[in-house]
Image (cartoon, rainbow, N blue to C red):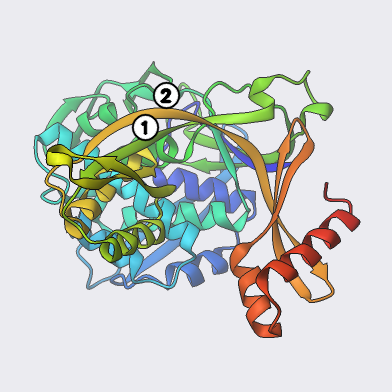
């Protein structure tokens, strides 16, 4: 079973509503403060209040700047990315928070016809937005969430006033962020989905149709600051487990694997030595590429070369292209979007005669189809015990079979 979190934004979504709902779900405030303390941010205070809206109990979460803090301190994307990267937060939190800010930056860049590097955040660069985004990732990591799903986003109606003037709802950045995402416009006057809320949901969510089968465990409500006559200004989060197909609906292809969009970047290179190519491949994987590899090609004037290929998530496309331009000799990078199917996977610790080792388990329709010991663990164990790697792997595979993983 996979841990899943469902957004139910029947009255929109914002960063503080998400954090309020996570706290209502059971995220300890002290744990949140401890993790946020790993960021080098200026002074701020967290306010957490239990409230009741139209008979529904929830949490109203707010970030207040300290006395010496400018509430509207603006930051560029690179400054925010460095702030996150240089912290001691968990790598999953860093990756997701960085991806959310990158998505925000790309939306702002497109709206204002500028580059990601030149975008200067105002509302979303302030300390409260950083706390909302990083805090949301901290909460999701605390609950061990692996999959995210959302009902359509309620955008609201009327107008919204911000640093660029008064605009019809949704604001330009929000409109860009929710492109191709299920939304609806409500009669409630006001901005119900903020850019921060839209960026968090549209970055994290892969399931958009509500087709998965769950066993719900708990729910939580996060409240916005405003109150409306028509509907409680609340966001509901539901936490649970996605069931194996034999416990739910009849099995089908979509239950045997899941589909995701990926980006392929390629460049043909014939003037770069092999050591530098090897260095780039290792660096790309370290920088969170999904895969990086080379294929021999014959180039013009019969020169031997390589076709460099990097697979990444669409949100990381520009970051990976920058890495290719910085670390290789190519003058151009081509890219395309594609789809891939992924089997359900999990990592478990296996107790062996040689100690504990992580094993990766892949399943198809609930049946184990592949089990592999983690290479780095295997390598470290072989070095520690002075056993040939191939010999150790044979022994470990035998114990994997003996313990029923086949």
Front residue of 187 and 406: 406
Residue carrying label 1: 193
Q: Earlier in the sequence, mark 2 or mark 1?
A: 2
Occupied quadrant, residue 368: top right
Residue plotted at (60% across, 49% down): 24
**SS category of the residue bearing label 1:** loop
Q: How many marks?
A: 2
Occupied quadrant, residue 54: top right
Q: Are marks 2 and 1 in contact (CB under 8 Å)?
A: yes
Q: Position of residue 96 (x, y in %)?
A: 43, 51
Tag 2: Cα neighbours inside 10 Å, few (<14), some, or many (≥20)?
many
Q: Is residue 219 visible?
A: no
Residue plotted at (49% across, 57% down): 92
Looking at the picture, does residue 62 appear above or below residue 14? Answer: below
Looking at the picture, does residue 44 appear above or below residue 195? Answer: below
Q: Position of residue 175 (x, y in %)?
A: 27, 26
Mark drawn on residue 154: 2
Q: Position of residue 279 (x, y in %)?
A: 32, 64
Front residue of 250 and 388: 388
Mark drawn on residue 349: none
**SS category of the residue bearing label 2:** strand
């Amino acid at each position: 079973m996979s841990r899943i979190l469902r957004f139910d934004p029947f009255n929109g979504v914002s960063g503080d509503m998400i954090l309020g709902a996570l706290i209502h779900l059971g995220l300890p405030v002290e744990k949140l403060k401890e993790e946020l303390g790993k960021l080098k941010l200026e002074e701020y205070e967290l306010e957490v209040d239990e409230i009741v809206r139209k008979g529904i109990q929830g949490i109203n979460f707010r970030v207040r700047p300290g006395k010496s803090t400018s509430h509207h301190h603006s930051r560029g994307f690179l400054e925010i990315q460095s702030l996150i990267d240089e912290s001691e937060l968990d790598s999953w939190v860093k990756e997701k928070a960085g991806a959310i800010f990158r998505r925000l930056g790309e939306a702002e860049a497109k709206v204002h016809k500028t580059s990601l590097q030149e975008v200067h955040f105002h509302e979303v660069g302030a300390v409260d937005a950083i706390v909302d985004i990083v805090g949301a990732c901290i909460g999701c990591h605390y609950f061990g969430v692996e999959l995210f799903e959302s009902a359509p986003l309620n955008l609201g109606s009327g107008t919204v006033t911000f640093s660029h003037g008064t605009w019809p709802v949704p604001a330009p950045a929000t409109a860009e962020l929710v492109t191709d995402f299920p939304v609806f416009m409500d009669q409630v006057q006001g901005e119900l989905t903020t850019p921060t809320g839209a960026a968090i949901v549209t970055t994290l969510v892969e399931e958009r149709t509500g087709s998965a089968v769950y066993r719900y465990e708990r729910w939580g409500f996060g409240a916005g600051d405003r109150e409306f006559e028509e509907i409680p200004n609340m966001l509901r989060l539901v936490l649970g487990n996605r069931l194996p197909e034999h416990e739910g609906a009849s099995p089908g292809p979509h239950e045997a694997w899941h589909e995701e969009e990926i980006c392929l970047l390629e460049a043909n290179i014939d003037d770069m030595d092999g050591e530098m190519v090897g260095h780039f491949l290792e660096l790309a994987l370290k920088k969170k590429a999904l895969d990086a590899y080379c294929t021999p090609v014959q180039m013009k004037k019969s020169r031997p070369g390589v076709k460099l290929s990097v697979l990444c998530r669409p949100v990381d496309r520009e970051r990976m292209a920058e890495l290719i331009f910085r670390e290789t000799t190519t003058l151009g990078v081509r890219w395309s979007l594609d789809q891939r199917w992924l089997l359900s996977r999990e990592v478990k610790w296996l107790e062996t005669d040689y100690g504990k080792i992580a094993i990766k388990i892949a399943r198809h329709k609930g049946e184990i189809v592949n089990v592999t010991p983690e290479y780095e663990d295997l390598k470290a164990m072989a070095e520690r015990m002075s056993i040939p790697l191939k010999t150790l792997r044979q022994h470990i595979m035998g114990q994997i079979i003996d313990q029923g993983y086949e």
